[in-house]
Amino acid sequence: MLGPWRIHAKFQERLKEQLRVLLIGEPAKVCFHAKALEKVYSLNLDPLKELVEPMYSLIGRPAVKQPEIFRAMVLAVHYQISITKMVQWLRSDEVLAIACGFDPDELPGVGNFYDLFNRLWLAEVPHKVLRPPLQKKKKELKANEKLPPDNPDTVDELVRKILKGKSLGSGPERLLQDILAECAVKPSAELNLLGDTSHLTFAGDGAPLATGGSARGKKVCDCKQKGIYRCSCPRYYTDVNANWGWDSYHRCWFYGHTLYCLNAANSPNDLPLMLSLRQASCHDSITFVMAFDQLGSVLPEFGFDKVLLDSAHDAYPIYRLLNEKEVEPFIDLNPRAKKKRGDDDTVTIDPKGIPVCQADLKMVFWGVDQKRYRLKWRCPKYKNLNNCEFKESCSSSNYGKVKYTRPEKDLRLFTKTPRSTKTWKKIYARRSSTERSLKRLLVDYLIESLRARSDKQWFWWATLAAVNVHLDAQVKVVSGGSLMKELATEHDVA
């Protein structure tokens, strides 16, 4: 059962009282932990109780210090140290123990932290699994080329399920996604750090995570004694769900997982909205469809207007899904497409959905016909039609050739905001925000340097890093931090 839970307001009062006493005797120690103190002062864990309470039995020995342990895990990522190291710090640093809400004589052990790890992950994770070895592919892909999906129809099948009302939002990581939303994303929204949450623009992208588990596994057969050094007998693997994937940025194969991030693209702080973890071989288009469905269930009160994605997401089922959900797609086209012939034989459609006239010139976008909901394009030489050699065969009108395209005719090519316009380019330029968001998680908080050996550990640490990213932004917006500013005024501490 769940033990006593100190509410956030009482935690803040207690923290300030204890820090006032410590500032008299050890001001240097308090100032050393100033940023961490500001973070825990802002981190409201009251919503956490309602989320985790169903995970505890109604009878038995109560689990105590659960919010304090969660704060300690957040600060472990802040200081970029392991759980074991964090427990050692708590026992040797009184200020850090107070920051987490512990009494110096009631500090937890390492096992208490991992008990919370296991309890909030909605699946049993075996320590190891016996399976045949996965062969690493030797063929290298081209620069920036993504590993194609094993089954091209997977995206279409997932989209069909979603449009039929089936949910893909359940998974072992769902509770952690809710915790990130309630304890970090929504408080940031209340501080207006995400922009207008009723009309959000969001972006998505994936990043490779090389696991600490062995890609070769541990042999249990006697083939080596028989002189057979390369066998396909089942082996023990510690990272159960890891497999081989292609890192398109570094142009190399890696063994592990893919961390997918959806973030608020218009936020100057590039704040993550939701995280998802998949196998390394999972294509970004598949991961996005599943993450998009989860996003709607995790943040149902948010309104999403636009989504910014790279060419790996350029698939007709994704356009159909976004059109049904009334989200405008801004997706870079995959160069695999060729020009298409329009209804008019004198006009072709280039891979970006822009009509091209007989003179091989792109026609000029001339706005939207609101009555018939179609896009209007004019002759590129409309200012001086007499200079066009195709004037007679193209159009005899003094207004010049006119071409209309309909977004509903081809959702991929004829987008609501034409790709050739400055508006489209300006909006799509914010897609890089998801790369900066991933950089904050993977590089600044060293998530990619971990040697974790299960998707549970990877997702836990990534979630804690995302909470820290939100807290960094929240502390900045509250006048540079309210706690230390108040204590410094009282005690004249710089």
Image (cartoon, rainbow, N blue to C red):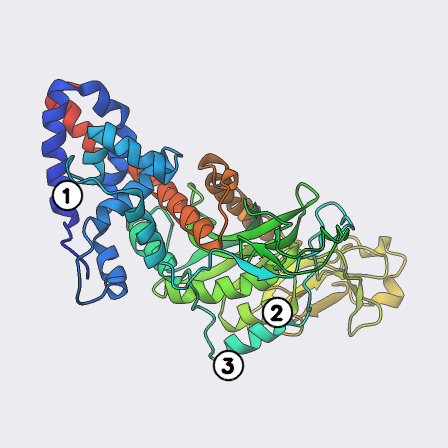
Residue type of the residue flagged with mark 2 = Val
Q: Looking at the image, which residue is at 46% across and 61% down?
A: 305
Report x, y in % for residue 131.
61, 62
Graded by Cα atoms within 10 Å as few (under 14), some (14 to 19) or many (20 or more), the crowding at tag 1 reads: many
Sequence-wise, which precedes: disc 3 or disc 2? 2
Between tags 1 and 3, which lies in front?
1
Q: Is residue 463 visible?
A: yes
Quarter of the figure with the C terminus: top left
Report x, y in % for residue 193.
35, 46
Q: Do labels 1 and 2 touch, CB within 8 Å?
A: no
Q: Is residue 275 left or right of residue 44?
A: right
Q: Looking at the image, which residue is at 54% across and 65% down?
A: 289
Q: Looking at the image, which residue is at 88% across and 65% down?
A: 392
Residue type of the residue flagged with mark 1 = Phe
- Rendered view: 338 above or below 27: below
Q: Looking at the image, which residue is at 60% across and 75% down?
A: 157
Sequence-wise, which precedes: disc 1 or disc 2? 1
Residue 155, numbered circle: 2
Q: Nearer the viewer, residue 212 or 228?
A: 228
Residue type of the residue flagged with mark 3 = Lys
Residue 64, numbered circle: none
> SS of the residue at dot 2?
helix
Sequence-wise, which precedes: disc 1 or disc 3? 1
